[in-house]
Image (tube, rainbow, N blue to C red):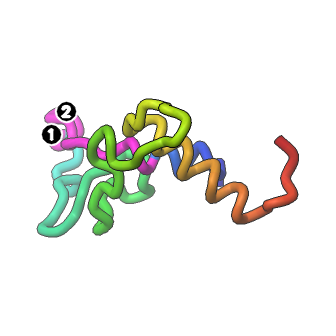
Amino acid sequence: HDGAAYVYSLLTGYQDPSAELLKRFPEATPGQGLYHNPYFPNLNLAMAPPITADGQVTYSDGTKATVDQMSKDVAAFLVWTAEPKLDK
């Protein structure tokens, strides 16, 4: 559902749950080995954040390797692998 936008949101959405959320829904507290991500259906998942800091890759064209840029590229790559003949 929502394809590349969902993948991008999931990759960039890791965060601590807000105090307001935890007050209203204490069950949203991540358990041991879980990570909070509001874009995941039950809010907590076992996958650690895969893209955690700027500079994890080097772009040959000099593009700055930010978490945002790398997440967009991963999402675009997954769309392409699913349908490599997809038009730009």
Q: Is residue 15 magenta?
A: yes
Identity of the amino acid at label 1? Lys
Looking at the image, residue 75 lies above or below residue 48: above
84 displayed left or right of 65: right
Residue 20: which quarter of the image?
top left
Q: Which residues are magenta?
A: 10-23
Question: Is residue 78 or residue 46 the one in the foreground?
Answer: 78
37 displayed left or right of 19: right
Question: Is residue 65 or residue 19 the one in the foreground?
Answer: 65
Question: Is residue 43 or residue 60 the one in the foreground?
Answer: 60
Looking at the image, residue 49 lies above or below residue 38: below
Disc marking residue 23? 1
Identity of the amino acid at label 2? Glu
Q: Which residue is mark 2?
A: 20
Residue at position x 69%, y 55% in the image: 79
Q: Are marks 1 and 2 in contact (CB under 8 Å)?
A: yes
Quadrant housing the C terminus: top right
The percent coordinates of residue 72 (x first, y second) are 54, 41
The percent coordinates of residue 52 (x first, y second) are 28, 47
